[in-house]
Image: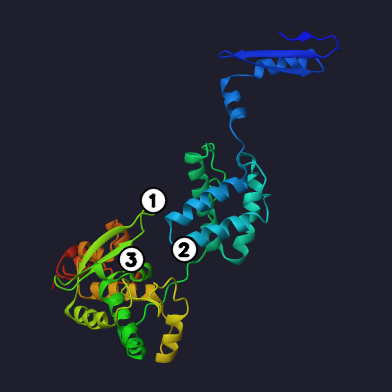
Amino acid sequence: MPYKQPNGRYRASKMINGKRRQRVFRTKGEATKWEASQDAEVWEQEDRPTVTVVDLSNAYLDYAKERYVKFTYQEKVRAFRNLYSFVLRETPAESIDPRLILDALRHRAKGSANEANKDRKNLSAAWAWGHDYLALSDRNPFRSIKRFSYDARERHMPTEDDFWKAHAAASREDQAFLLTALHTAARRGELFRLTWPDVDLAQGRIRLATRKTKDGSLEYAWLPMTPQLRRALEDHGKIKRSMFVFSQEDGQPFTSRQHYMERLCKRADVKPFGFHGIRHLTASILAKANVDIPTIQAILRHKSPNTTARYIRSLGFVDNTLAVVFGEQKDSPRTGRSEG
């Protein structure tokens, strides 16, 4: 119970698990209310170090820089930079006003709804990491914001003719690069990190490494090389500069080649397409050749056959099953046709 001190103030006292805390209040009612509100959970929260937004961003970005590729890391940096336009860096992370988060993401969405969704994803991932390593609560304020709707722009897939025109306009080294992309359906990052130990010319196979895993670790997959690709890489190996199969003049691996395909397509006088467009082209060629979904899934290195099915469907290679089935039943009364 609170007791009155000589100065007229009331001292409240509470003991939990052998620990005592005291506070002084102006009135007995305030002191009594404080004593009633104290429990072990409240004390644990009060003893927990305050994690500010900048504490979270610094710690998480240090982790991300070690774990993810440069492009992904920079995407996460931009997410926090945009957040700082609306939320003070010194704000306790647990006290972020969701309305400010919404304002920050809505402002971002004015330029690009897709970029706003990327910010939401990266900030949500940062909070989840903070929950695991900085003792943040499981109340993720970023995840509570709904995704923004947007019309995804369809990536342009080149025709085979346009691909080979671009291939012909490329240097000898880049022809090997483009052929590897086409004959393996490799993602851009997989080509950039490809090393010569990943190229087994004796066995006629190539190993690709991707970070398409939740923890950012590399996952490897061996694919057979076509005879044409094998010959191209044998020839390309005569001018190797470093351990990387495709590298810059100083032997360092490429990191983006941001405008390369745009310049190459302009030189070849074809509609511009990117590295991912080549991956789409490979899937298209496989689908037109009636390669089954499990095989295409293995080549594209998709985790789920559903992903491959959606991928193929987006390219327009899905049979109209109903038409195939009922189209064969020409003499059935159920088709509405005359039996003759």
- Which residue type carries mark 3? Tyr
Left or right, 109 with reference to 205 = right
Q: Which quadrant of the figure contains the C terminus?
A: bottom left
- Which residue type carries mark 1? Asp
Give the label on residue 215, or none: 1
Q: Earlier in the sequence, mark 3 or mark 2?
A: 2
Q: Residue furthest right?
A: 7
Give the labeled residue for mark 2.
70
User: Which quarter of the picture shows residue 198?
Assistant: bottom left
**Element class at badge 3:** helix
Viewer-proximal residue among 104 and 217: 217
Q: Distance of mark 3 from mark 1, alpha carbons?
A: 24 Å
Q: Are marks 3 and 2 in contact (CB under 8 Å)?
A: no
**Image location (x, y in percent) of residue 202:** 14, 72
Identify which residue is drawn at 61% across, 61% down.
108
**Element class at badge 1:** loop
Res. 269 visible in picture: no
Left or right, 102 with reference to 307 = right
Number of other residues with Cα within 10 Å of mark 1, as a class: few under 14, some 14 to 19, many 20 or more:
few
Front disc: 3 or 2:
2
Q: Distance of mark 1 from mark 2, alpha carbons?
A: 15 Å
Front disc: 1 or 2:
2
Left or right, 285 with reference to 99 = left
Q: Is residue 147 above or below residue 20?
A: below
Q: Is residue 97 above or below residue 269?
A: above
Give the label on residue 311, or none: 3
Q: Is residue 138 above or below residue 222?
A: above
Q: Are marks 3 and 1 in contact (CB under 8 Å)?
A: no
Identify which residue is drawn at 56% across, 24% down.
41
- Which residue type carries mark 2? Lys
**Element class at badge 2:** helix
Q: Earlier in the sequence, mark 1 or mark 2?
A: 2
